[in-house]
Image (cartoon, grey):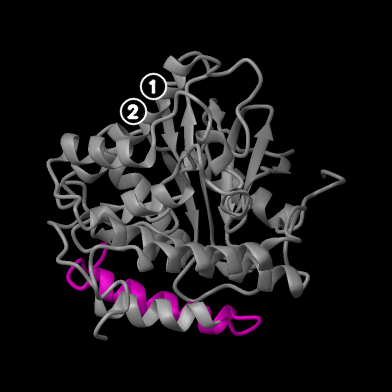
């Protein structure tokens, strides 16, 4: 048995599951926590016969609409049918007695993930950084082009009223995670409810689409090896994915507090990466969708990021996080809500500015 089994893994029970359900997954197994995960916990699992990835919900404080392992497993199976760059799912365990919560196993892929910095020697030229920007947009457009009925996901969600439900659901999740009152939150909820735009034709929505959830080819930064972290995937408004991507995307001229609230955004502020406006225009051109209401989706994205960050902050205060780097999440929440309100105040839609509501 491994001596230093990371938190969140019941070694004997999980090893038995691997032996019975994962080809080549015979003991002894070696588990290691993959850094970078702030929500679902992701582990690398190794044996003498292979390498896999195990995903499970976080320790403690699990929101009721999040961390559904069966949904994540199912969407990976669906998009894999059409060759979309996503890890192939291998086995799902819904028996909570095995490891306290359901979990699933998927294939392990090699590549480069750009989180808070670009690895030394990678994407060093402006041309290669521009290629990453193009790949991010093209891969999102490709996801939204998948016929979800054809891949068995026709009943995966209720796309009608998706944005209204998002606003309501994230307001409820804020109420569950709130560690102190923030005046900006009530104002944002009021404006987001009043200014809901007319959604385009529904598509698969990743729900957490951003550069940090893309694995890139180690030799070709312009090729996506895998899109990761599908836990919030559903059917709905594709522009919500674009808005969410923009929430993480920094550019030259962003303030220090903007960068600190989203540490990954400092990467894309470097020369060569597209600006947020360029991403919007490229998505509109490749997808053929009207992107004129994108400000609403950007406000919604910052608001959602603030709620997610507050949930992490709540788990940190309760001593239920694994790993390091959680100390500043309370301040990040406050900044994200403030940024959302700043975008809303400058929006073209008067309802989003709070006029007449």
Q: Position of residue 80 (x, y in %)?
A: 32, 38
Q: Position of residue 290 (x, y in %)?
A: 14, 50
Mark 2: few/some/many CA within 10 Å (<14, 14-19, 20+): many
On screen, residue 179 versus residue 185, left or right, reads right
Give the camera-side residue of 190 and 206. Answer: 190
Give the camera-side residue of 203 and 287. Answer: 287
Residue extent of the magenta highlight: 156-182
Q: Which label is found at residue 97?
A: none
How many marks overall? 2
Q: Which residue is mark 1?
A: 131
Does 35 lie within the magenta span?
Answer: no
Mark 1: few/some/many CA within 10 Å (<14, 14-19, 20+): some
On-image quarter of the C terminus: bottom left
Question: Residue drawn 34% across and 71% down?
Answer: 166
Question: Residue drawn 53% across and 74% down?
Answer: 63
On-image quarter of the N terminus: top right
Is the Cβ of the residue at disc 2 closer than 8 Å to that at disc 1?
A: yes
Question: Residue drawn 55% across and 27% down?
Answer: 112
Q: Is residue 315 visible?
A: yes
């Amino acid at each position: 048995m491994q001596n230093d089994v990371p938190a969140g893994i019941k070694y004997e029970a999980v090893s038995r599951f691997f032996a019975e359900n994962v080809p080549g997954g015979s003991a002894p197994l070696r588990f290691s926590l993959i850094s970078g995960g702030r929500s679902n916990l992701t582990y690398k699992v190794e044996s003498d016969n292979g390498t896999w990835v195990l995903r499970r919900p976080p320790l403690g404080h699990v929101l009721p609409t999040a961390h559904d392992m069966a949904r994540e497993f199912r969407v990976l199976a669906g998009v894999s049918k059409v060759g979309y760059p996503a890890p192939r799912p291998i086995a799902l365990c819904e028996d909570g007695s095995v490891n306290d919560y359901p979990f699933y196993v998927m294939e392990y892929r090699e590549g480069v993930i750009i989180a808070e910095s670009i690895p030394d020697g990678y994407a060093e030229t402006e041309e290669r950084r521009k290629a990453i920007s193009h790949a991010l947009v093209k891969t999102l457009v490709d996801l939204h082009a998948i016929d979800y009925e054809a891949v068995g996901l026709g009943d995966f969600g209720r796309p009608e009223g998706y944005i209204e439900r998002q606003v309501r659901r994230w307001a409820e999740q804020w109420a569950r995670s709130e560690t102190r009152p923030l005046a900006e939150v009530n104002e944002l909820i009021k404006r987001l409810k009043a200014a809901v735009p007319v959604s385009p034709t529904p598509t698969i929505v990743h729900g957490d689409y951003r550069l940090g959830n893309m694995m890139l080819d180690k030799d070709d930064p312009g090729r996506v090896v895998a899109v990761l972290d599908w836990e919030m995937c559903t059917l709905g408004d594709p522009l919500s994915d674009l808005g969410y991507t923009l929430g993480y995307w920094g550019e030259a001229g962003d303030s220090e507090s903007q960068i600190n609230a989203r540490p990954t955004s400092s990467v894309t502020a470097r020369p060569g990466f597209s600006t947020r406006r360029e991403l919007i225009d490229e998505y509109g051109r490749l997808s053929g969708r009207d992107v004129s209401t994108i400000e609403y989706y950007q406000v919604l994205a910052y608001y959602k990021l603030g709620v997610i960050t507050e949930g992490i902050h709540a788990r940190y205060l309760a001593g239920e996080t694994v790993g390091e780097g959680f100390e500043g999440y309370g301040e990040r929440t406050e900044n994200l809500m403030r940024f959302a309100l700043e975008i809303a105040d400058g929006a073209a839609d008067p309802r989003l500015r709070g006029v007449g509501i």
